[in-house]
Image (tube, rainbow, N blue to C red):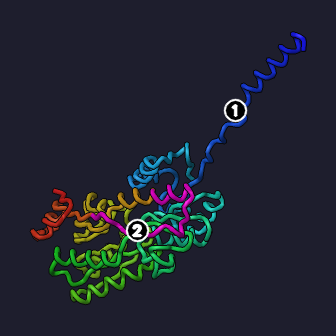
Amino acid sequence: MNLRSFGVALVFAAGVFMVAPSSFAQAPAKVQRIGILLPNLTGNSWREYPLWKELFASLAGLGQVEGQNFVVESRSPEGGRPERLPAAAAELVATRPDVMIAPVCGAPLNALRGATRTIPIVVATCTDDMVAAGIVASLARPGGNVTGLQKLTPELSAKRLELLKQLVPGAARIAVLWNPGYSDLAADWQALRSAAQAMKVTLMPFEAQSAAEYAPAFAAMTVQRVDAVFTFTDALGYVNAQRLADLAAKHRLPAIYPFRETALAGGLIAYGPNLSDMFRRSAGYVDKILRGAKAAELPIEQPTKFDFVINLKTARALGLTIPQSLLLSTDEVIE
């Protein structure tokens, strides 16, 4: 080989050496897709809610960072109308997410299950009895494409009625504000009616399937001369915490709520699971599924943290004296 040929060969070999590492480098990790179905919120406003911030912060702590490891597709029904949830769910499924999140059971989860029985679905705060409702085969082994956290709502509904009765001992006619468009809440109603019978109180149902229906419902309660108000847990009530607290104050009706946020907004009393903790824990399900776990094999978990909050300012405005036994058992008292 002459000197010129040797030089050409050397340059060629050097080029191969320089190119080879990039040619055999490991392919970048796949950016996965998380789908979120929002029953009431539109646009990007949902990202400002603390619960979603908690979930994404927990995902980041598990090594799942939006924009690096995953992207988000969100859909919500036009106008927040529950009958349009199936169309929104179909749009979401069409984006081919690796996992989907339903913040609650009821209509949102039903819409997602109607759109797919294969894409994994994580429920952050399920109100229904998931076994009794046929959503999962068992809590220990769900068996389908749905897993997540269940809120033990029937037992908590009976407990909330007991607390309301302690706070307003003379209450005989109690309005139950509920959203049948969210869920039939069959287990909750059963537990609530049983508790009401034992306490010798009459339950009077008032429906509200949108925020616009809250004011007429409270006006009707006043006409029917109810003594107090009981509210079920659903996403509409959480999003409209301030509106519910304001209407109860306007009509001078003592009310109990399932969400701490309603008591912070001026509601009288709240008792229920700590939703922030449940959203944080739901991030663990999403992370496991993105790493290859099957929803069918991830056990349903229950809440472990609960909020019991009393707003003393509201109690004074209503002329109520809070029993010392209740004050001593609260997690938070708002002066």
Q: Which residue is mark 1?
A: 22
x and y, in percent, of residue 71 in the image: 57, 49
Instruction: Decide which of 216, 134 is in the foreground and name it.
Output: 134
Q: Residue at x 49, y 68 (%)?
A: 147
Disc 1, SS: helix
Q: Is residue 139 left or right of residue 6?
A: left
Amino acid at dot 1: Ser
Magenta residue span: 284-306
Q: Is residue 256 left or right of residue 55?
A: left
Q: Residues within 10 Å of mark 1 (few under 14, many from 20)?
A: few
Q: Residues within 10 Å of mark 2 (few under 14, many from 20)?
A: some
Asked if one can make out residue 246 in the rendered structure from this viewpoint, the answer is no
Number of the front mark, 1 or 2:
1
Position of the C terminus, as image quadrant, is bottom left
Q: Which residue is mark 2?
A: 301
x and y, in percent, of residue 249 in the image: 24, 65
Q: Residue furthest front?
A: 1
x and y, in percent, of residue 89 in the image: 59, 65
Amino acid at dot 2: Glu
Asked if residue 60 is among those painted magenta in the image, a careful observer would answer no
